[in-house]
Amino acid sequence: MTVGVREEPREAVRPRTPRRLPLPTLLALLVGFAGVGYRLALLFADAPPTNSDEATMGLAALHIARGDGFPVWFYGQAYMGTLEAYLAAPLVALAGPSVLVLRVPTLALYALFLLLSWRLTRRLGGDRWYALLVVAVLALGADRVVKNQLIAGGGYPELNPAGAALALLTVGLCVTGAGARLPRWAAWGLVAGVLLWVDPLILPYVLTLGALLVARRWRELAGRAGVVLTGALLLGAAPMLVDSIRHGRNPVTAVLAAGGTGTPADWADRLHGALVLGPPLAMGFCSPGRCATWQLWWAVAFPVLLVLAAFTAWHTLRRTSGGPGSPERVPAGVRLALLGGAAGVLGAYAVSNAAGQTPIESSRYLSCLAVAVPALLWPLWQAARPLVAHPFAARRLTARRQLAEVAVSDRPAEGQLAEVAASDRPAERQFAEVAASDRPVERQLAEVAASEEGGYRHLPEVESIKAAGGRPAGRRARMAAVGALAVIAGVLGTGVAATVDVARTAPGVHAEADRHRSLVDTLGALDVRNVRGGYWTCNRLTYATGENVLCAVVDDDLTPGFDRLPAYRREVAADPDAAWVAPAGSPLAARLDERVGAESDALDVVAVAGWRIYLPRR
């Protein structure tokens, strides 16, 4: 009866349908584009405002592009590597010096941070809706946040994407086979080494994630993996190590000195700056340059969430089945490491003088708290999930949830697989293949759980499956869900308000940048090549002119100030026609106005919008 009948391949009977992006993934993509687009619009509006520190990094990029030098450190100090200058140098060579070309690499780093954070959230057990929440929080851009992310002033823009990359690599090293781990060991060491050169603020994350790797892979680290990791770490930190050996400088001492100089700050001021002002400023809850009282609520919520998330991760580690090497324990372990890193960053800032002396500006030292957002918000999402579950979760469970139902049920696996295969649910093809195969069911179930259709590398918690399937939550659970949703709404609402405040200040920032461009044009028309000015004037002016105008720093009393590039002072001192430049209304301008008059040695003044140029009388 079967003569002449040819068996068609399975693909011919059931053609593969094109895969579409799930709704939360599509929304996360749109939110990510909105976050990047918002920052791009700020860049074209000259916001956030630039300064001489960013211009110093620009001068380093200019020198690299010209081949005039290859600086290891931010000019004038022996710490904070110049990675941003090397990233911007090709653009400076192509388009010339400008603030925009300096910030194109930092914008790309921010986009990479969003992508890595989304992926990290998924690898740590979060569903796509939770990953969307994480992306939405990180897409908001308050004053201090966009400054940390976009200003190429040294260290901050690259810390967050590198920290997220380290966490992702840690997950991969903990769950992949030994044969596939050597490249990841090399990548982990290289990223960690580069971070130590660029800015040691990320060191707490390096230590906690490294401790997790040692705890899980210590046998492997005793062999080839340890050699590869050490070699890659030394390679990444090579600029710092070579320079320290050549010049006998200790970057650790320089970093500690940068934590605040002068009279030690009072402990009450340090704790207020670190614990009250620091988290709201660093996490994007404050208006430009200040924190209103109502925006400080995050100062209370942050430590509570930090402790609650750490307890949740520790509890999951304790009750999860399997030994230390069990992959089911990896997400909780990495979350705990991220939270420990965040606590370390906050603690290091709290003991520094900067937290008490300049808390508003120094809150940039807490910028890498954002790396821990996927772990920090996890308890909120766990509590809120019964109220925000997908409306079709009870009828259209994903392949991963169907697999979990099979795994936790007392009924025979083969019978359940047959039922699933006969249904129209998404996993029908996978389970039909499992049911028809002669291979052990348990092994095939593990493979399905690790597949892309399953969406995760580990099985979900049984409680989350039951909740998603529609089991009514208790009164306490509902109250917790409502509270968690209120906090999530507060996070998003406060962040949106602070973001709107930044957008409102953009026109004023753009007008100030136009005034500075007028200053540059006027100096060119006057054929001025050397000037003296304040610290926040000099390098910004020199970079904007591509070193056509050199500037030596003076203090308000006209005495020499801090020059990050001493060669500029020598050039200016040799020019008898060197001019003076000061912002209108500044103390320096008031002092120079005293020298304007009819005397032969007096100064002539040229007024430009927002600026005053003082020319020696010829």
Image (cartoon, rainbow, N blue to C red):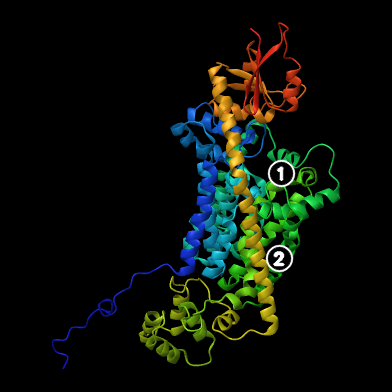
Is residue 195 visible in the rendered structure shown here? no
Q: CA distance from mark 2 to mark 1?
A: 25 Å
Residue in the foreground of this view, choosing between 203 and 312: 312
Left-right relation of 144 to 168: right
x, y percentage for residue 552? 66, 22
Q: Dot 1: few (<14), some (14–19), or many (≥20) neighbours within 10 Å?
A: some
Q: Which residue is at 71% across, 64% downward?
A: 306
In the image, is residue 130 above or below residue 35? below
x, y percentage for residue 103? 53, 41
Q: Assign the C terminus to one quadrant of the image.
A: top right
Q: Which mark is residue 305?
A: 2
User: Disc 2 or disc 1, which is closer to the eye?
Assistant: 1
Residue in the foreground of this view, choosing between 565 and 611: 611
Residue identifier under label 1: 361
x, y percentage for residue 192? 59, 50
Taking the view exactly as shown, the residue that stands out farthest to the top is 600
Q: Assign the N terminus to one quadrant of the image.
A: bottom left
Q: Tag 1 or tag 2, which sits nearer the N-term?
A: 2
Left-right relation of 519 to 354: left
Secondary structure beneath disc 2?
helix
In the image, is residue 122 above or below residue 322? above
x, y percentage for residue 519? 59, 25
Secondary structure beneath disc 1?
helix
Amino acid at dot 1: Glu
